[in-house]
């Protein structure tokens, strides 16, 4: 059954973000697309507390480095990116590595327009949410929530202004990034399990959220 909807037009702010992302890929390697799987994701696939392989949805997959890594570790992978040239390179990379990855060109805030019905056991987001316009972030959260299996995990990396000692910093622009308080407010039915500072020169964080299991 086709569960997709017709695409909604993007507004001016969304178009600005889209052009900026396209520019990164046109000019060369985007800073978030390093070609190296981060150790935080490796810990979920190889570490002593690794998760059993299941279904995973990657939001903002770029050229497919992490989608390929997940597929090589037994995960059933669906991956989404807004930029068509990134998706094409991800398809090439998956073919080169001989792994199966469902790659979708589309908007992570409009998952109902894509063939990604779920349920998913894991969501992975490397700098996608923190670049989404504020007025589209609730739609992103709702899309994941509708597709989350009971007890699903979300591992998200993002930049933000938030020192851990001041968790109430308010985000007033998408360019400011993301905070733990924002995730708590937007992801209804999820628990923020962990916030770990990144090692970048600017403030970054790894956020882990768990989907609450309904009684």
Image (spheres, rainbow, N blue to C red):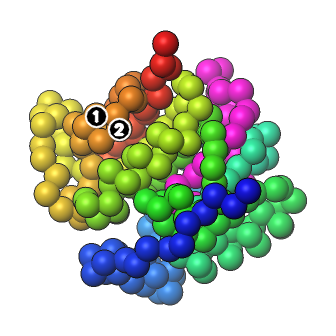
Among the 4 quarters of the image, the one containing residue 127: bottom left
Locate residue 95, reporting x and y percent. 83, 66
Up-down relation of residue 153 to residue 33 (above or below): above
Is 210 or 40 nearer to us in this picture?
210
Residue found at x 44% / y 67%: 31
Mark 2 and mark 1 residues within 8 Å of each other at the beta carbon = yes
Badge 2 marks a residue whose secondary structure is loop
Locate residue 191, reporting x and y percent. 38, 26
Residue 147 lies left or right of residue 94; in this view the side is left
Magenta stretch contains residue 78? no
Among the 4 quarters of the image, the one containing residue 51: top right
Could you classify mark 1 by the number of other residues whose Cα lies within 10 Å: few (under 14), some (14-19), or many (20 or more)? some
Residue 42: which disc? none
Among the 4 quarters of the image, the one containing residue 34: bottom right
Q: Which residue appears farthest toward the top when viewing the image? A: 215
Q: Could you tell me which quadrant the N terminus lies in?
A: bottom right
The boundaries of the magenta stretch are 43-70
Could you classify mark 2 by the number of other residues whose Cα lies within 10 Å: few (under 14), some (14-19), or many (20 or more)? many
Residue found at x 33% / y 54%: 137
Residue identified by numbered label 2: 187
Residue 184: which disc? 1
Magenta stretch contains residue 69? yes
Can residue 39 be seen in this snapshot? no
């Amino acid at each position: 059954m086709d569960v997709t909807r017709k695409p909604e037009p993007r507004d001016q702010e969304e178009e600005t973000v889209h052009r900026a992302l396209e520019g990164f890929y046109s000019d060369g390697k985007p800073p978030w697309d390093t070609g190296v799987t981060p150790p935080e994701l490796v810990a979920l696939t190889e570490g002593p507390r690794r998760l059993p392989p299941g279904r995973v949805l990657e939001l903002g997959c770029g050229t497919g480095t992490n989608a390929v890594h997940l597929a090589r570790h037994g995960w059933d992978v669906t991956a989404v990116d807004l930029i068509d040239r990134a998706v094409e390179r991800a398809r090439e990379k998956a073919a080169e590595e001989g792994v199966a990855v469902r790659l979708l060109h589309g908007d992570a805030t409009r998952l109902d327009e894509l063939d990604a019905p779920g349920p998913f056991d894991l969501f992975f987001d490397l700098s996608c949410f923190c670049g989404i316009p504020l007025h589209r972030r609730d739609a992103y959260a709702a899309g994941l929530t509708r597709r989350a299996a009971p007890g699903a995990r979300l591992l998200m990396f993002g930049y933000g202004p938030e020192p851990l000692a001041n968790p109430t910093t308010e985000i007033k622009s998408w360019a400011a990034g993301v905070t733990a308080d924002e995730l708590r407010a937007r992801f209804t039915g999820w628990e923020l399990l962990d916030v770990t500072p990144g090692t970048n020169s600017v403030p970054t964080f790894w956020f882990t959220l768990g989907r609450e299991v309904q009684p």
